[in-house]
């Protein structure tokens, strides 16, 4: 990786500085930034050795449409496995509401891009705000080279079971999932 990017022409931070920062062991953080004031409104610092990646906003079903009325779902790489963590978008500092994992879940590191097979109106589904449907749709979008159809279906069923069990009892999900 170093060889591929050492002469990157758009670099804004010197490579030696990047390497020094990596050796300092700075934690991975999930944060909400106010775009107008350019200030941090809320943040969550991941535990040492954990890397949060590819955060996605999932609107709350029947929500207000506000940018914090929903959930932030992200892949988290722990020292032992890949997990999917779900945060309340309005309260990142309280930590994840839920941590999902499966013994066969092995996510690759993703880039800050997305590939969409079809472009459609984001409000086209009546269930687009429902976290269960949102997560299942998100899993459906994963590349076949990353997960087989059967693995996706298993993960979707696990998510449905966990969220159904947690309906009205978020503590069950929050405390029952290993990290």
Image: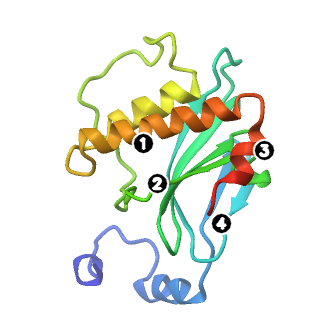
Pinpoint residue 66: horizontal percent, then vertical percent. 69, 25
Earlier residue among tags 1 and 4: 4
Q: Nearer the viewer, residue 10 or 98?
A: 98
Q: Residue at x 41, y 29 (%)?
A: 137
- The residue that mark 1 highlights is 155
Earlier residue among tags 2 and 3: 2
Label 1 crowd bin: few (<14), some (14–19), many (20+), radius 10 Å: some
Q: Are marks 1 and 2 in contact (CB under 8 Å)?
A: yes
Above or below for 93 versus 28: above
Q: Are marks 1 and 3 in contact (CB under 8 Å)?
A: no
Above or below for 175 versus 119: below
- The residue that mark 4 highlights is 46
- The residue that mark 2 highlights is 102
Q: CA distance from mark 1 to mark 2?
A: 7 Å
Label 4 crowd bin: few (<14), some (14–19), many (20+), radius 10 Å: some
**Which type of secondary structure does the marked residue at label 3 adopt?**
helix
């Amino acid at each position: 990786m170093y060889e591929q990017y050492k002469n990157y022409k758009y670099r804004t931070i010197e490579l030696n500085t990047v390497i020094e920062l990596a050796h300092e062991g700075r934690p991975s953080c999930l944060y909400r930034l106010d775009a107008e004031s350019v200030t941090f409104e809320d943040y969550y610092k991941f535990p040492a050795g954990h890397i949060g990646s590819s955060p996605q906003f999932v609107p709350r079903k029947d929500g207000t449409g506000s940018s914090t009325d929903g959930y932030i779902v992200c892949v988290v790489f722990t020292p032992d496995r890949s997990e999917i963590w779900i945060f309340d978008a309005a309260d990142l500092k309280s930590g994840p509401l839920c941590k999902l994992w499966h013994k066969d879940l092995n996510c690759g590191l993703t880039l800050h891009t997305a590939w969409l097979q079809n472009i459609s109106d984001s409000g086209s589904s009546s269930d687009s705000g429902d976290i269960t449907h949102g997560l299942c749709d998100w899993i459906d979008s994963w590349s076949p080279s990353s997960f087989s159809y059967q693995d996706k279906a298993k993960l979707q069923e696990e998510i449905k079971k966990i969220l159904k069990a947690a309906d009205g009892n978020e503590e069950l999900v929050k405390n029952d999932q290993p990290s």
